[in-house]
Protein backbone atom coordinates (compact mmCIF):
# COMPACT_ATOMS: atom_id res chain seq x y z
CA UNK A 1 0.00 0.00 0.00
CA UNK A 2 1.23 3.49 -0.78
CA UNK A 3 1.19 6.05 2.03
CA UNK A 4 1.23 9.72 1.09
CA UNK A 5 1.41 12.28 3.87
CA UNK A 6 1.82 15.97 4.50
CA UNK A 7 3.49 17.18 7.68
CA UNK A 8 3.16 20.71 9.06
CA UNK A 9 5.27 22.32 11.77
CA UNK A 10 3.79 23.18 15.18
CA UNK A 11 0.24 24.25 15.70
CA UNK A 12 -2.27 25.19 18.36
CA UNK A 13 -3.31 21.64 19.19
CA UNK A 14 -6.24 22.67 21.40
CA UNK A 15 -7.85 24.72 18.63
CA UNK A 16 -7.04 22.06 16.05
CA UNK A 17 -8.58 19.33 18.21
CA UNK A 18 -11.83 21.33 18.39
CA UNK A 19 -11.91 21.69 14.61
CA UNK A 20 -11.27 17.97 14.19
CA UNK A 21 -14.16 17.20 16.57
CA UNK A 22 -16.41 19.34 14.38
CA UNK A 23 -15.47 17.03 11.49
CA UNK A 24 -16.32 13.97 13.61
CA UNK A 25 -12.70 13.05 14.38
CA UNK A 26 -11.92 11.95 17.91
CA UNK A 27 -8.25 11.71 18.84
CA UNK A 28 -6.72 8.86 20.79
CA UNK A 29 -5.18 9.21 24.20
CA UNK A 30 -1.47 10.12 23.99
CA UNK A 31 0.67 7.21 22.75
CA UNK A 32 4.40 7.15 23.53
CA UNK A 33 6.42 5.80 20.63
CA UNK A 34 10.11 4.95 20.47
CA UNK A 35 11.28 4.32 16.90
CA UNK A 36 14.59 2.74 15.96
CA UNK A 37 15.32 3.24 12.27
CA UNK A 38 17.61 0.82 10.47
CA UNK A 39 19.49 1.15 7.19
CA UNK A 40 21.28 -1.52 5.19
CA UNK A 41 24.89 -1.82 6.37
CA UNK A 42 24.34 1.28 8.51
CA UNK A 43 24.23 3.58 5.45
CA UNK A 44 23.21 7.16 6.16
CA UNK A 45 22.59 8.23 2.55
CA UNK A 46 18.87 7.70 3.11
CA UNK A 47 18.95 10.63 5.56
CA UNK A 48 21.26 13.01 3.73
CA UNK A 49 20.61 12.31 0.04
CA UNK A 50 17.28 10.47 -0.01
CA UNK A 51 16.18 9.23 -3.41
CA UNK A 52 13.43 7.15 -4.95
CA UNK A 53 13.79 3.48 -4.08
CA UNK A 54 15.62 4.01 -0.77
CA UNK A 55 14.49 1.58 1.92
CA UNK A 56 14.48 2.00 5.68
CA UNK A 57 13.17 -0.38 8.31
CA UNK A 58 11.73 0.73 11.61
CA UNK A 59 10.98 -1.03 14.88
CA UNK A 60 8.38 1.03 16.76
CA UNK A 61 8.01 0.26 20.45
CA UNK A 62 4.89 1.34 22.29
CA UNK A 63 3.59 0.57 25.76
CA UNK A 64 2.15 -2.86 25.03
CA UNK A 65 3.24 -3.74 21.50
CA UNK A 66 5.87 -3.32 18.81
CA UNK A 67 5.66 -3.01 15.04
CA UNK A 68 8.08 -3.61 12.21
CA UNK A 69 7.71 -1.26 9.25
CA UNK A 70 9.51 -1.23 5.91
CA UNK A 71 9.27 1.98 3.89
CA UNK A 72 10.47 2.36 0.32
CA UNK A 73 10.60 5.96 -0.82
CA UNK A 74 8.73 6.91 -3.95
CA UNK A 75 8.63 10.46 -5.33
CA UNK A 76 9.79 12.21 -2.12
CA UNK A 77 9.84 11.86 1.65
CA UNK A 78 6.23 11.52 2.73
CA UNK A 79 5.47 9.29 -0.27
CA UNK A 80 6.41 5.68 0.27
CA UNK A 81 5.39 2.10 -0.15
CA UNK A 82 4.77 0.86 3.37
CA UNK A 83 4.56 -2.63 4.80
CA UNK A 84 3.91 -3.10 8.49
CA UNK A 85 3.36 -5.96 10.91
CA UNK A 86 3.23 -6.46 14.64
CA UNK A 87 6.23 -8.19 16.22
CA UNK A 88 6.04 -10.22 19.40
CA UNK A 89 9.72 -9.84 20.34
CA UNK A 90 11.37 -6.58 19.23
CA UNK A 91 14.76 -7.61 20.65
CA UNK A 92 14.76 -10.79 18.55
CA UNK A 93 13.74 -8.72 15.51
CA UNK A 94 16.64 -6.34 16.22
CA UNK A 95 19.04 -9.32 16.18
CA UNK A 96 17.47 -10.63 12.96
CA UNK A 97 17.93 -7.26 11.27
CA UNK A 98 21.55 -7.00 12.38
CA UNK A 99 22.22 -10.52 11.12
CA UNK A 100 20.84 -9.39 7.75
CA UNK A 101 23.21 -6.34 7.83
CA UNK A 102 20.54 -3.79 8.80
CA UNK A 103 21.86 -1.54 11.56
CA UNK A 104 20.24 1.17 13.70
CA UNK A 105 21.16 4.68 12.55
CA UNK A 106 18.68 6.97 14.33
CA UNK A 107 16.11 6.93 17.13
CA UNK A 108 12.97 9.05 17.33
CA UNK A 109 10.86 9.47 20.45
CA UNK A 110 7.46 11.09 20.35
CA UNK A 111 4.05 11.33 21.91
CA UNK A 112 1.28 10.94 19.34
CA UNK A 113 -2.46 11.43 19.33
CA UNK A 114 -4.19 10.10 16.24
CA UNK A 115 -7.61 9.86 14.72
CA UNK A 116 -9.45 9.12 11.48
CA UNK A 117 -11.84 11.18 9.46
CA UNK A 118 -13.00 10.13 6.05
CA UNK A 119 -10.15 8.39 4.25
CA UNK A 120 -7.49 10.24 6.24
CA UNK A 121 -5.47 9.58 9.36
CA UNK A 122 -4.40 12.62 11.34
CA UNK A 123 -1.59 12.63 13.90
CA UNK A 124 -0.71 15.34 16.39
CA UNK A 125 2.89 14.73 17.41
CA UNK A 126 5.21 16.10 20.06
CA UNK A 127 8.63 14.93 18.91
CA UNK A 128 11.61 14.95 21.25
CA UNK A 129 14.25 17.44 20.04
CA UNK A 130 12.02 18.67 17.17
CA UNK A 131 8.80 20.16 18.55
CA UNK A 132 5.17 19.76 17.51
CA UNK A 133 3.77 18.66 14.16
CA UNK A 134 0.51 17.76 12.45
CA UNK A 135 0.50 14.93 9.93
CA UNK A 136 -2.31 14.07 7.55
CA UNK A 137 -1.94 10.89 5.55
CA UNK A 138 -3.85 8.82 3.07
CA UNK A 139 -3.34 5.20 2.09
CA UNK A 140 -3.63 4.91 -1.69
CA UNK A 141 -3.31 2.48 -4.53
CA UNK A 142 0.27 1.90 -5.64
CA UNK A 143 -0.21 3.93 -8.83
CA UNK A 144 -1.75 7.01 -7.14
CA UNK A 145 -0.62 10.43 -8.37
CA UNK A 146 1.33 11.79 -5.39
CA UNK A 147 0.91 15.45 -6.32
CA UNK A 148 -2.87 15.11 -6.64
CA UNK A 149 -3.04 13.39 -3.24
CA UNK A 150 -0.77 16.00 -1.65
CA UNK A 151 -3.05 18.75 -2.98
CA UNK A 152 -6.07 16.92 -1.53
CA UNK A 153 -4.29 16.67 1.84
CA UNK A 154 -3.35 20.36 1.79
CA UNK A 155 -6.97 21.33 1.12
CA UNK A 156 -8.11 19.28 4.13
CA UNK A 157 -5.45 20.86 6.32
CA UNK A 158 -6.39 24.34 5.11
CA UNK A 159 -10.03 23.59 5.99
CA UNK A 160 -8.73 23.13 9.55
CA UNK A 161 -7.15 26.59 9.48
CA UNK A 162 -3.61 25.35 8.80
CA UNK A 163 -1.21 26.68 6.17
CA UNK A 164 0.80 24.79 3.57
CA UNK A 165 3.54 27.36 4.25
CA UNK A 166 4.26 25.44 7.47
CA UNK A 167 5.10 22.21 5.61
CA UNK A 168 8.05 20.17 6.82
CA UNK A 169 9.15 17.90 3.98
CA UNK A 170 11.61 15.79 5.97
CA UNK A 171 10.60 12.78 8.05
CA UNK A 172 11.25 12.82 11.78
CA UNK A 173 14.07 10.32 11.31
CA UNK A 174 15.78 12.57 8.77
CA UNK A 175 15.34 15.64 10.97
CA UNK A 176 16.78 13.90 14.05
CA UNK A 177 19.64 12.44 12.00
CA UNK A 178 20.48 15.89 10.61
CA UNK A 179 20.58 17.31 14.15
CA UNK A 180 23.33 14.82 14.96
CA UNK A 181 23.34 12.06 17.51
Image (cartoon, grey):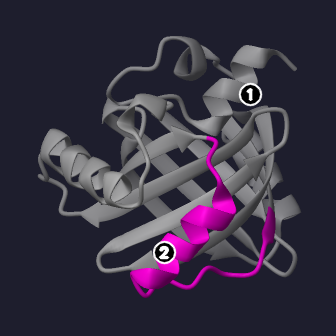
Image coords of residue 143 (percent x, y): 12, 52
Residue shown at 41%/60% (left/top)?
160
Q: Is residue 19 magenta?
A: yes
Q: Nearer the viewer, residue 18 or 140?
A: 18
Q: Earlier in the sequence, mark 2 or mark 1?
A: 2
- The magenta-colored residue range is 10-32
The answer to whether residue 81 is seen in the rendering is yes
* Secondary-structure class at tag 1: helix
Quadrant of the rendered image containing residue 164 = top left
Quadrant of the rendered image containing residue 10 = top right
**Callout 1: 10 Å neighbours few (<14), some, many (20+)?**
many
Image coords of residue 104 (percent x, y): 77, 35
Image coords of residue 29 (percent x, y): 75, 81
Task: Say left or right for 34 vs 11.
Answer: right
Residue shown at 64%/19% (left/top)?
43
Tag on residue 20? Answer: 2
Image coords of residue 75 (percent x, y): 27, 31
Q: Is residue 136 magenta?
A: no
Disc 2 and disc 1: Cα gap in Å? 28 Å
Task: Say left or right for 137 vs 42.
Answer: left
Q: Nearer the viewer, residue 173 or 38?
A: 173
Amino acid sequence: MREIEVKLKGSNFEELENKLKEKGCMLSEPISQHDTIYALKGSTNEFSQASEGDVVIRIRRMKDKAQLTLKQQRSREGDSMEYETEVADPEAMHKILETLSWYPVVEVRKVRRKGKFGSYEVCLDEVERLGTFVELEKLCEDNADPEMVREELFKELESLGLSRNDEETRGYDTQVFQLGK
